[in-house]
Amino acid sequence: MLQLQPGSAGCIHKIEGMNPILRRRLADLGVSEGVNIRLKGKGPFWGPITLECNGQLFAIRRKEASLIEVNVS
């Protein structure tokens, strides 16, 4: 996920090694394998990143974002 630049999008290939509670919360927002996701912005000083998926905007820590593998479209 972190290889994307702000404004670019990709398709989620794999989510691996994530805390099950966070993974469930992301699934409730529609974040799962095969779904398109867009990087909206990166926080300063290694802060959280803002993502858009299925019309939902949310922010997650870079540590968790690094566990999401994305195929760039």
Image (cartoon, rainbow, N blue to C red):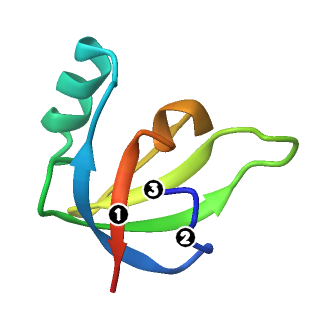
User: Badge 3 local density, few (<14 within 10 Å), some, or many (20+)?
Assistant: many
Q: On the rendered structure, is 65 left or right of 5?
A: left
Type of amino acid under label 1: Val
* Label ID, residue 54: none
Q: Residue at x 16, y 63 (%)?
A: 35
Q: Height in image: 3 above or below 17?
A: below
Cα separation between marks 1 and 2: 9 Å
Q: Height in image: 70 above or below 24?
A: below
| Disc nearer the start of the sequence (3/1) | 3
Q: Position of residue 8 (x, y in %)?
A: 49, 80
Q: Which residue is mark 2?
A: 4
- Which secondary structure lies at badge 1? strand
User: Badge 2 local density, few (<14 within 10 Å), some, or many (20+)?
Assistant: some
Q: Which corner quadrant holds the C terminus?
A: bottom left
47 or 19: nearer the eye? 19
Contact, mark 3 vs mark 1 (Cβ under 8 Å): no
Q: Which residue is mark 3?
A: 51
Q: On the rendered structure, is 53 left or right of 50?
A: left
Q: Position of residue 53 (x, y in %)?
A: 28, 60
- Which secondary structure lies at badge 3? strand
Q: Which residue is mark 1?
A: 70
Q: Height in image: 43 above or below 47?
A: below
